Amino acid sequence: MRKIMLAICLGMWIWPAFSQGLDHDVCAHAMEIFPNEPIPLQSNVQATRSEEEVPDGIPITCIKSFENDLWYFFTVKSGMSYYKIRVNPIGCNTPAGMQALIIKSDHCDPESFEYIGCQNPQDESLLELFVEDSTVGTRYMIYVDGYDGTECEFILSLEAFSANPQTLEDIARQQYDYAEIEPAFHPEDIGVQFVNNESLITWTADSRSETHLFIIQQVITQRSGLNIAKKLNVVDPKNTVGASDELRYQYLDNRVVFPEQESERCYRVVRVLPSGEKLYSETFCVPIDLIETFFISPVFASETPQVYQINYQNRKKQDLVYVLYDEQEQELKRLVRKKEPKRDGVITIDMSPYAPGFYTLRVEGADGTYVRKFFRE
């Protein structure tokens, strides 16, 4: 009765849930679904996986692990160029929820898969994915899986539209972007620096430009040579009235996990207009030059007035050199710790001789330098 009432509230008719004999547990027997038509309530409780048809996972898609998947497909219809796929979990045995992937392919060979969209919120929330295609008969597969083996009942729906149904909020939520589009956003000084084992991305934009938001994406090259982009975050614009002004933006990618094969990180900035149009920047990259033998925290105020400090971790016996600079990059003081042993510790900085303002602490070790900027109040 609960399921029937839920179906009525959602405005759709639902047949009993699948529980055994799931033909669409394998790609070759994917269930065909049709735009704007009801689909039975689904369940992946009895689903397994087939190794020979597993799609790519992270970082090419958002799928972290492949456990209990189900397969569906639809084809593009005449007069309908936009498709919205919704996967709504309504009962899961863990709060991890579900993950879903849109694949363009006529076959179940993973080598033929062209990825279109991916969602993995890692909680029991609604997934929404979009397809734009006007070529009648083009085949798309929907791959649905429980995150980390989660078992769920879920409502699957497919809607078709003649005009783009995506809202600005929909655009901001999309985790992966597989579009191959010529750059149309050209800030003069866009770029990235790798400092403190972090990527600092900077760009400028006109303060009076019509911008809804900026999306920061990491660009990853697939085996085929095509690029895909993973959303890292969104940045709100700083619009002003009156005179035009070039405003500087920055975003810090401070993820600390670096796969062994990763020698550089590449990024792009997407400017999203109020109309929903997306303007892409060029892709720009920075070599990864990791400091692995020590770590220096940001500078922070201690409990003692005018005294600041940093935490450090030294993972190898080495010399560590601490140098304090003022805003004009003039050296103010220096501390050399010879043959610092492997240990964690604290360094204090007495700032009482100096006026309030911006300062920089540089710490040099055997395999690199940390640069920590801070404000002395």
Image (tube, grey):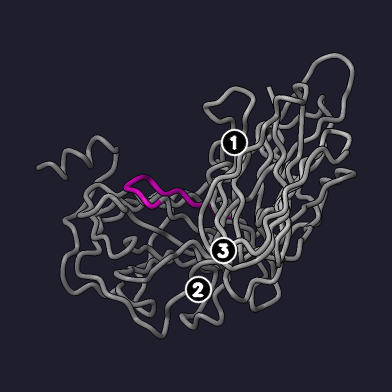
Secondary structure of the residue carrying tag 2 is loop
> Type of residue at label 2?
Asp
> Type of residue at label 1?
Leu
**Figure quadrant of residue 337:** bottom right
- Is 13 contained in the magenta span? no
Instruction: From the image, tell me which residue sits under label 1.
Output: 168
**Figure quadrant of residue 329:** top right
Instruction: From the image, tell me which residue sits under label 2.
Output: 56
> Type of residue at label 3?
Pro
Image side of residue 288 versus residue 156, left or right: right
Secondary structure of the residue carrying tag 1 is helix
Q: Which one is nearer the viewer's eye here, 24 or 250?
A: 250
How packed mark 2 is, by other alpha carbons closer than 10 Å (few <14, some 14-19, many 20 or more), is some
In the image, the segment drawn in magenta is 122-131
- Mark 1–mark 3 Cα distance, whole angstroms, equals 53 Å
User: Looking at the image, is mark 1 or mark 3 nearer the viewer?
Assistant: 3
- Mark 2–mark 3 Cα distance, whole angstroms, equals 44 Å
* N-term mark: 1 or 2: 2
Q: Which one is nearer the viewer's eye here, 361 or 285?
A: 361
From what the image shows, is residue 29 above or below residue 4?
A: below
